[in-house]
Amino acid sequence: MTTTKTDPYLALRNKEFRAFVLARLLITMALTMQAVIIGYEIYELSNSKLLLGFIGLTEAIPAIGIALYGGYIADKSDKRTLLITSISLYTFMCFLLLLFTNSSSIQLLGNKDVIILIFGIIFFTGIARSFASPASYGLIAQVIPREEYQSAITWSSAAWQSGAVLGPALGGVFLGILGITHTFSIIVIILCIAIYLLFQIGKKPIQYVPQDESVFESALQGLRFVFNNKVILSCISLDLFAVLFGGAIALLPVYAKDILHVGAEGLGWLRAAQAAGAIVVLLILAYFPIYKNAGKILLASVFGFGIFMILFGISKIFWFSMLCLVISGALDGVSVSIRHTIIQLSTPNEMRGRVSAVNSMFIGSSNEIGEFESGATAALMGTVPAVIFGGVMTCVVVATTYFISPSMRKMELGAEPITE
């Protein structure tokens, strides 16, 4: 791995970016806490592996369905205000979960109706995400200069991964100690603090004013841009299929309860393990960012991710399962840093929202669709075979990409836009 030492705190010297990063940390922490609780609660109420997969699919359907429109709105709006509005909707949805999942509501409504209500709330959370993701992506580029992009992406990714470490761990611990109602109350408070931090960022100029084209035509411009940029398209395709097949997050409640026998607290640690590995790598990359051989390193990291997911699938020992998840998370952290840098460097300011929407459609939502794939294959072939199958398919996708995409193999990172 060829690296060059740089100022690791370059982007953090920007006051508004610090507020953004801290808000991102808290938002991620709150939403991953919520994800752990919802998964465990759904499995407790239904004992259904397939429903665990439907959790992700329910959020992905609206996120994909209106993603292009969300990107269009993000480009033509004040991104800070749109992000605050989206996070406020997240907060309201979490408050509803607090009301419907307490013991009195379950006793009054019954397990089936509570499950239906939870899935309805998840659906609206997906709508909020379709606007929050492009708004957040575009806002980063408005609070920092171009030469600080890679530093900013590294710290932004580290904040996300830190939240993904703390959120599941705290969610599992709080769920076991305080119960579901008090844990949801804590999540609401965390989201309110994040909203306050976002208000510390000043309003930014709108960089895109639609001309004569229709909303549909304008929204499609981001899709065309991605498909005309071979490197971005290769990165998105690689991650799409790798995450689609390689993720096993939806099945962690099954591993925690039925295979590793570690309960809610163990589930929290399992959910945090991948992000723990990722944040260590991202902090290293803040000091030693990748420039040379970035394409080959990206392919190798995703291939390694698939291998360690296979090892996780066959493990019945808690510490070894944790180790596999930590290493797979570290490898994923490398790919996240490279991929996000490529997209930021390659995207014009006036199209960031729409390109982010395409990225969200093919990558962000692939996490949820991958959870559905995991739940469905687990229901068909069993939990362990499903995880092994996903890891093998990830490796196959990487090998295929290596041979059919020479531009990916040759890719290197620099300050100039990547256009091939």
Image (cartoon, grey):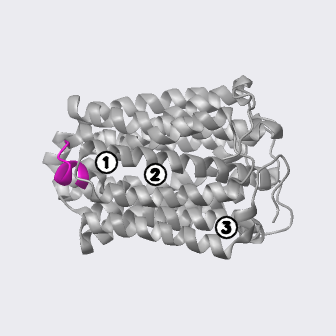
Q: Main secondary structure of the magenta part?
A: helix
- Residue 43 appears in the figure: yes
Residue 23 higher or lower than 386, as above or below: above
The magenta stretch spans residue 258:
yes
Snapshot quadrant of residue 246 = bottom left
* Residue bearing the label numbered 1: 321
Q: Residue at x 58, y 41 (%)?
A: 85
Q: Nearer the viewer, mark 3 or mark 2?
A: 3
Q: Nearer the viewer, residue 301 or 53?
A: 301
**Callout 3 crowding tier (Cα within 10 Å): few <14, some 14–19, many ≥20:** many
Residue 214 higher or lower than 119, as above or below: below
Secondary structure category for the residue under label 2: helix
Disc with the residue nearer the chain's start (2 vs 1): 2
- Residue 242 disc label: none
Q: Which residues are magenta?
A: 254-262
- Residue 125 disc label: 2
Task: Please identify the quadrant where the C terminus is shown.
Answer: bottom right
* Residue bearing the label numbered 3: 234
In the image, taking residue 92 as reference, residue 336 lies left or right, namely: right
**Callout 2 crowding tier (Cα within 10 Å): few <14, some 14–19, many ≥20:** many
Q: Nearer the viewer, residue 408 or 188?
A: 408
